Amino acid sequence: MSYPPLNYFTDKEGIEKYSNPKMVQKRAKEYGVFVVFSPRKNKKYRIVNPETNKYVDFGFFGMADYTHHLDKHRRNLFRVRNHKWKDAPKYSPAHLSWCLLWT
């Protein structure tokens, strides 16, 4: 599978204040999907669900994630607060956020 560059659709201005796109792209590749910036103004990233061929947008734009701040205490608080996301369907926004933005 060939992975297009992260800015495949368009650059997401200001995303560096909230996330580390290169780290997310690396994790997505390990996860078996490719990630692009979401065209939705309130979401950070988008993947195509390989099971349904539908877009899945995830990551609230405007909130920093672990790939940006690398604060393990904040990550642990997020994991406690959202522990059910770990068991969500593999290509749901919740599970993608858990695996790609907060692991």
Image (spheres, helix red, strand yellow):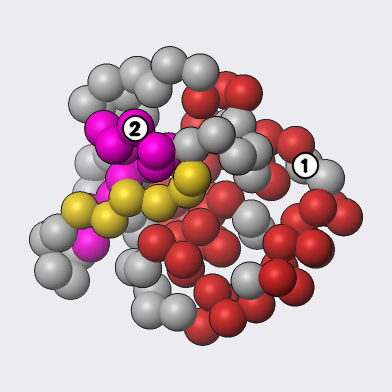
Mark 1 neighbour density, 10 Å: few (under 14) some (14–19) many (20 or more): some
Amino acid under disc 2: Lys
**Residue 14 screen position, x and y as percent:** 51, 18
Mark 1 vs 2, N-terminal side: 2
Rendered location of residue 76, percent (x, y): 80, 63
Left or right of 70 in this view: 11: left
Whether residue 26 is visible? no
Q: Is 40 within the magenta?
A: yes
For the magenta stretch, what is the residue range? Answer: 38-49
Category of crowding for the residue at label 2, using alpha-carbon neighbours closer than 10 angstroms: few (below 14), some (14–19), many (at least 20): few
Q: Is residue 27 left or right of residue 37?
A: right
Say if residue 88 shows up in the picture.
yes
Give residue 41's quadrant in the image.
Answer: top left
| Residue at the left extreme, as displayed | 53
Up/down of 51 relative to 38, above or below: below
| Residue drawn at (46%, 55%) of the image | 30
Q: Which residue sits at x=22%, y=26%?
A: 9
* Mark seen at residue 41: 2
Structural distance between the alpha carbons of marks 1 and 2:
24 Å
Quadrant position of residue 33 = bottom left
Tell me whether the residue at label 1 lies in contact with that at label 2, contact meaning CB atoms closer than 8 angstroms. no
Closer to the camera in the image, 1 or 100? 100
User: Which residue does the numbered mark 1 point to in the structure image?
Assistant: 70
Q: Is residue 38 above or below residue 77?
A: above
SS category of the residue bearing label 1:
loop
Q: Amino acid at mark 1?
A: Leu
Q: Secondary structure at mark 2?
A: loop
